[in-house]
Image (cartoon, coloured by chain):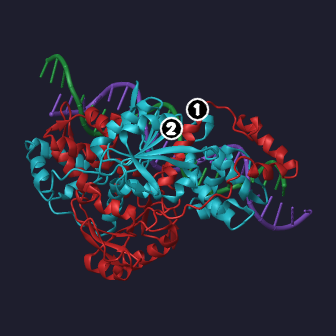
Chain colours: A red, B cyan, C green, D purple
Amino acid sequence: MGRSTQSSSQSPDSGAARRPSRARGIPEATVARLPLYLRALTALSERSVPTVSSEELAAAAGVNSAKLRKDFSYLGSYGTRGVGYDVEYLVYQISRELGLTQDWPVVIVGIGNLGHALANYGGFASRGFRVAALLDADPNVVGTTAAGLPVRHMDELEAIVADQQVSIGVITTPPVAAQQVCDRLVEAGVTSILNFAPTVLTVPDGVDVRKVDLSIELQILAFHEQRKAGDEPTAGESVLDRAPGPVRAAAAKLRRAAGGTAKAEAAKGPSAKGTDGDLSAVMPA
Amino acid sequence: MGRSTQSSSQSPDSGAARRPSRARGIPEATVARLPLYLRALTALSERSVPTVSSEELAAAAGVNSAKLRKDFSYLGSYGTRGVGYDVEYLVYQISRELGLTQDWPVVIVGIGNLGHALANYGGFASRGFRVAALLDADPNVVGTTAAGLPVRHMDELEAIVADQQVSIGVITTPPVAAQQVCDRLVEAGVTSILNFAPTVLTVPDGVDVRKVDLSIELQILAFHEQRKAGDEPTAGESVLDRAPGPVRAAAAKLRRAAGGTAKAEAAKGPSAKGTDGDLSAVMPA
DNA sequence: TAGATTGTTAATCGATTAACAATC
DNA sequence: TAGATTGTTAATCGATTAACAATC
C-alpha cells in the first residue's frame, strides 16, 4: 500500500509493483507483444495485404506462431480457420485493446538530446500519442523549439496537465531531478510515467511507471558477449570462481575464513576503477 | 537455422532466439537485474557504506529481498549471515560477472538526436563502455562532432571495427536503414547489437540483438491507463466484446456468419485513422 | 470434399515468493 | 549466547510451446 516502486520494463518484469496486469485477463507478456503485432500488421495494411496467417505474421513480428495464436486468443476469436486473420480488422482490434483509438496527450520533461529525439519520434504521433508540451527547468532551454513546439517552463506543468488532461508523462531529465519531477507530475494528476532517467522512482499506488534504461541494455549485451569470446579466466579471477555452485560456495567460505582479506583484495584487483563514476545525466541538458 | 530474429528486450523475453542465457547457470531474469543491483551498490559505495543487507539493497534497487538473495545465490555465496553483503566486494563480483571489468569499444551508427543522446550518456563510459566511433551515412552529418568525437562516414565502419576490435554496435538510424546497417555490422565482426530502430532485425546465429522501443513502452502504458479511467465501452464497441471469453467468441462467430461485414464496419468505425502513418524514423537524422 | 489454419489443450519450463534452517 | 540475516528449499504462479481437434 501507499507507495510502490515501478516495474522494470526491460526485464522479464519487475516484481515490486504488481500492476493490474491481468485486468480483463490479458497476461502482461501478451500486452507487451501487442505493439509488435500492431506494427507488423500496419506494415501489411500499408501494402494492402488483406489477410495474413499466424505463421506469416509471427515471422514478421519475430515471435513463434503458437505464441501469437495464444496471445490473440486472449483478445477473442478474430481469425478464420483455414484462412487467417483479416489485417484491417486485427489492426483495429489490437489498437482498441491497447487504447490507441483514443488520443493520449503526453508531456515530455527534460529537453536535452533525448527529449529532442522523443519529441521528433515518428512512432508517437502515429499511435495516438500527442505531445501536449515540452518542459524544462533550464531558462536557457525554455523558449527554444523542438519538433516545432516551444519548450515551456516547468512552472507551467500543473496548468498544462489540467488543461489538456494529460495522464502520461515522460521523464528525460538528469537522474537527480527525476524523483522530484515525478512527484510533481503525479501531484498534477499524471498516472502513467515513462522514465528514462537511471533512477528508481517511488510513486503512489495507482501510478504506473515503466523505465527504459539505455545502459542496462548494454550491460546485458556485455554479459553475453563475455561468454562468447574464449572463457579464459580474467586476471585476478580464481579458477574456483568458475567452478560449479557448491565448489564456488566453498571457495567463498574459505576466503571469509581467511579473515576477509580475499574480499578486500578482489575489490582492488583489476577493478581499480572500482568506485567508478556515477551514471551522471541521462543526457546533459 | 542460420538466421534468427532477436529477442525482445523490454518484453518478458522473446522466444525467437534462445540465447546462451543460462550459460554458467545464471537465469536471464537474474542477468537483467544485475545492472540494477550494481547501480544501487555503486551509489552506496560512493557514500562509503561498507555493508548492506539484502533488505536494504533490495529496497534501493526496487525489488523484493527474496528475489535479490536468490539472484545473488547464482553468483555464489558472497554475503555473511547476520551481517549482510560487503558493498565493495559485491560491486566487484557483479561487475566481473557482467563483464564490466573489461573495456568494451562500441560504435554508434546514426547520429541524429538519439545518437547524440547516447554519445553523451554518462552511464556508458562509467561502465566500461567506450565509444570507439560515431558513424553516419549523411555527408552533412559526417565531420560534425558529438560528445567531443568526430562523426565519421559509414565507409570507415569495417576498418574501425577491425582496428579497435569492436564487438558491440548500437543502431540509431531510421528504420529503413536498420537491417542494412545491421548486416554490415555483423559482416564486419560485431556480435552484439543494441537496436533502437523500430524494426525486427534478422541476424545469424551467434549474434545477439536487444532492442529498445520507445513507442512500445508508451503503448503498454496506454493499455494500463485505459483501464484506470472508467470502463465505459468505446464508441463502436459491442458490449459483447467486453464479455467473458466464451460469449465473446460466440459474438465473433456471429459477426463472421453475417458475412464479414461486422469486420469491415469495425475497421472503419472510430479508427478512421486506420491505416495510420508509419513509425517513420527513430529520429530524423 | 480436401487442404489449410485457427483456437485450445496440456505438458513443460522458468521465475517468483514465503518461509526457515544454517550460521555469522 | 542471542539476534540478525543469509542461502536454500519448496510451493506457486505465469509464460512458452508442440500438438491437434475443430472448422473454415
The quarter of the image holding the C terminus of chain A is bottom left
Disc 1/disc 2 C-alpha distance (Å): 10 Å
Q: Which residue is mark 2?
A: B167
- On residue B206, the disc is none
Task: Say which residue appears at 42% left-offset and 56% top-offset.
Answer: B146
Evaluate whether residue B86 shows in this view.
yes
Q: Which residue is mark 1?
A: A229
Q: Furthest-front residue in view?
A: B143
Q: Nearer the viewer, residue B265 or A248?
A: A248
The amino acid marked with disc number 1 is Ala
| x and y, in percent, of residue B245 in the image | 29, 49
The amino acid marked with disc number 2 is Ser
Q: Nearer the viewer, residue A103 or B255?
A: A103
| x and y, in percent, of residue C21 in the image | 78, 49
Q: Chain of mark 2?
A: B
Instruction: Count every numbered label the image shows and give the total.
Output: 2
Q: Is residue B262 left or right of residue A205?
A: left
Q: Is residue B38 left or right of residue A256?
A: left
In the rendered image of this protein, does residue A86 appear above or below residue A114? above
Task: Say which residue appears at 25% left-offset and 58% top-offset.
Answer: A100
In the rendered image of this protein, does residue A24 appear above or below residue B183? below
Evaluate whether residue A9 shows in this view.
no
Tell me the crowding category of disc 1: few under 14, some 14 to 19, or many 20 or more residues within 10 angstroms, Cα based.
Answer: few
Rendered image quadrant of residue A189: bottom left
Rendered image quadrant of residue A86: top left
> Which mark lies nearer to you, 1 or 2?
2
| x and y, in percent, of residue D20 in the image | 33, 25
C-beta proximity under 8 Å, tags 1 and 2: yes
- Mark 2 secondary-structure assignment: loop
Q: Chain of mark 1?
A: A
Discs 1 and 2 lie in a common subunit = no
